[in-house]
Image (spheres, rainbow, N blue to C red):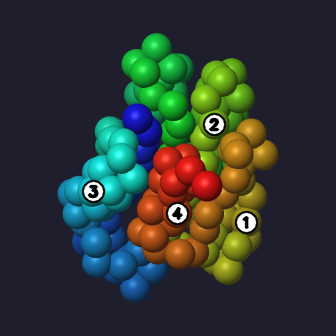
Amino acid sequence: MILILNGPNLNMLGKREPQVYGNTTLEDLEALCEDWAGDLGSSATCRQSNFEGQLLEWIQNASEEGFTGIVINPGALTHYSYALRDAISSQTLPVIEVHISNVDAREAFRHVSVTAPVCKGKISGLGVLGYKLALEYFLGGE
Ligand code: DQA
């Protein structure tokens, strides 16, 4: 059972800069993630918030809620939220960071991720497929 978290502004997917983030809406993305996890014999619970504190609480409680891994696209919080970094490193579940766009090919401020060093890994620039690859890592077996 995997927790998928999307951070600030990702509720605007499909409407927001489609040349950068594509045409898939958050609703579409969440349905895809649920299907992909189902195909892998498990389930995904998808949540989105524009509020840092809400994301922290979901991460803090993920283990007690029974999740076995977290996939997170922290949006712009990636680049500066030490609180999010501490929440990730304070709990025991593996976390994979996903970015739809290639953050390393964009503005300099996006080249820094304060959260990636405390994650299992980071997938960037592969569009919504990044979420599928993260689910395969957690659920795919051999
Ligand atoms: C993003 C990249 C971030 O730099 C940006 O602030 C986002 C989305 C991505 O998915 O490509 O909100 O995380």
Total numbered labels: 4
Question: Would you identify the image quadrant in which residue 58 lies?
Answer: top left
Image quadrant where residue 99 sits: bottom right
Tell me the amino acid under the disc marked 1: His
Q: Residue at x 70, y 53 (%)?
A: 121
Residues tagged 4 and 3 counted as in contact (Cβ below 8 A)? no
Label 2 vs 4, first from the N-terminus: 2
Neighbour tally class for label 3: few under 14, some 14-19, many 20 plus, Cα within 10 Å: some
For label 2, the residue is 94
Q: Position of residue 69 (x, y in %)?
A: 53, 36
Q: Position of residue 62 (x, y in %)?
A: 47, 24
Q: In the rendered view of the protein, which quadrant contains the C terminus?
A: bottom right
Label 2: element kind = loop
Could you give the CA–CA distance between mark 2 and mark 3, rounded to whole angstroms?
21 Å
Report the Cα–Cα distance between label 4 and label 3: 13 Å
Q: Real-space Cα distance between discs 1 and 3?
A: 31 Å
Near mark 1 (Cα within 10 A), the count class, few <14, some 14-19 or many ≥20, is some
Q: Which is nearer the N-term, disc 1 or disc 3?
A: 3
- Residue 110 relative to residue 46: left or right: right
Mark 4 Cα within 10 Å, few/some/many (few <14, many 20+)?
some
- Amino acid type, label 2: Pro
List x then y, in percent, for residue 60: 53, 20
Mark sitting earlier along the chain (1/4) = 1
| Front label number (1 vs 3) | 3
Q: Is residue 24 visible?
A: yes
| The N terminus, quarter of image | top left
Earlier residue among tags 2 and 3: 3
Q: Nearest the camera: 72 or 93?
A: 93
Task: Report which residue position mark 4 lands on.
Answer: 133
Relative to residue 57, is residue 41 drawn left or right? Answer: left
Q: Residue at x 42, y 44 (%)?
A: 4
